[in-house]
Image (tube, rainbow, N blue to C red):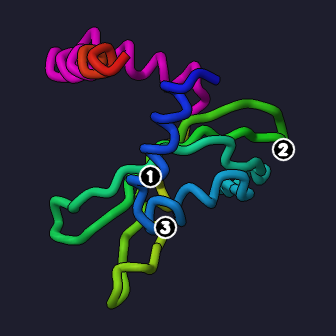
């Protein structure tokens, strides 16, 4: 690994708050999805991105995008968008708040993004802005 990459990783780790670290420690944890009249889907959190946010409802949250690897009853990878409520006197308690989170196979999520971007200019503009910002940091 190059010095620049190592420096970037160290800087990211130094900037992470205790809450972000707690959320990221859940990588590797098992996940279970139960649907009525369907078999239970089991897997684990393979990777995760977290961002602390002030909720538009007034509270504080930790927003996450998860990469989930399912192993039962079939093998596939999915993306989940979710969040934790941050609670407690010292804002040190996490409560998973996304029981009904959007979770789709990676290809289905990509198809949803493509369809929405084709049909909705506001979403296409959002994705274009995201690509521009990511490119600035490369």
Q: Residue 65: x and y, percent?
A: 47, 43
Image mark for residue 51:
none
Magenta stretch mostly in which secondary structure?
A: helix
**Earlier sequence position, callout 2 versus callout 1:** 2
Of residues 3 and 136, the one nearer the viewer is: 3
Of residues 125 and 15, the one nearer the viewer is: 15
Q: What stretch is highlighted in magenta?
A: 104-130
Of residues 13 and 127, the one nearer the viewer is: 13
> How many numbered marks does the figure carry?
3
Mark 1, other Cα within 10 Å: few <14 / some 14–19 / many ≥20: some
**Earlier sequence position, callout 2 versus callout 3:** 2
The answer to whether 12 is drawn above or below residue 52 in the figure is above
Mark 2, other Cα within 10 Å: few <14 / some 14–19 / many ≥20: few
Residue at 36 percent of width and 14 percent of height: 115
Of residues 43 and 131, the one nearer the viewer is: 131
Identify residue for label 3: 96
In which quarter of the view is residue 86 placed?
A: bottom left
In which quarter of the view is residue 90 placed?
A: bottom left
Residue at 30 percent of width and 16 percent of height: 131
Q: Decide: marks 2, 3 in contact (CB < 8 A)?
A: no
Query: Among all residues in the image, which is located at the extreme top?
Result: 118
Residue at 54 percent of width and 23 percent of height: 108
In this rendering, would 29 be left or right of 49? right
Residue 58 within the magenta-colored segment of the rendering:
no
Identify residue for label 1: 82
Query: CA separation, marks 2 and 1?
Result: 22 Å
């Amino acid at each position: 690994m190059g010095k620049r990459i190592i420096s970037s990783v160290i800087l990211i780790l130094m900037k992470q708050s205790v809450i972000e670290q707690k959320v990221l420690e859940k990588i590797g944890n098992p996940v279970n999805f139960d649907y009525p009249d369907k078999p239970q889907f089991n897997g684990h959190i393979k990777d995760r991105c977290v961002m602390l946010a002030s909720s538009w409802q007034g509270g504080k949250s930790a927003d996450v995008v998860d990469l989930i690897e399912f192993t039962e009853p079939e093998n596939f990878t999915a993306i989940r968008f979710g969040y934790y409520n941050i609670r407690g006197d010292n804002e040190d308690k996490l409560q998973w708040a996304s029981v009904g989170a959007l979770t789709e196979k990676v290809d289905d999520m990509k198809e949803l993004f493509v369809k929405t971007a084709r049909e909705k200019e506001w979403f296409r503009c959002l994705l274009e802005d995201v690509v521009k910002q990511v490119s600035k940091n490369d």
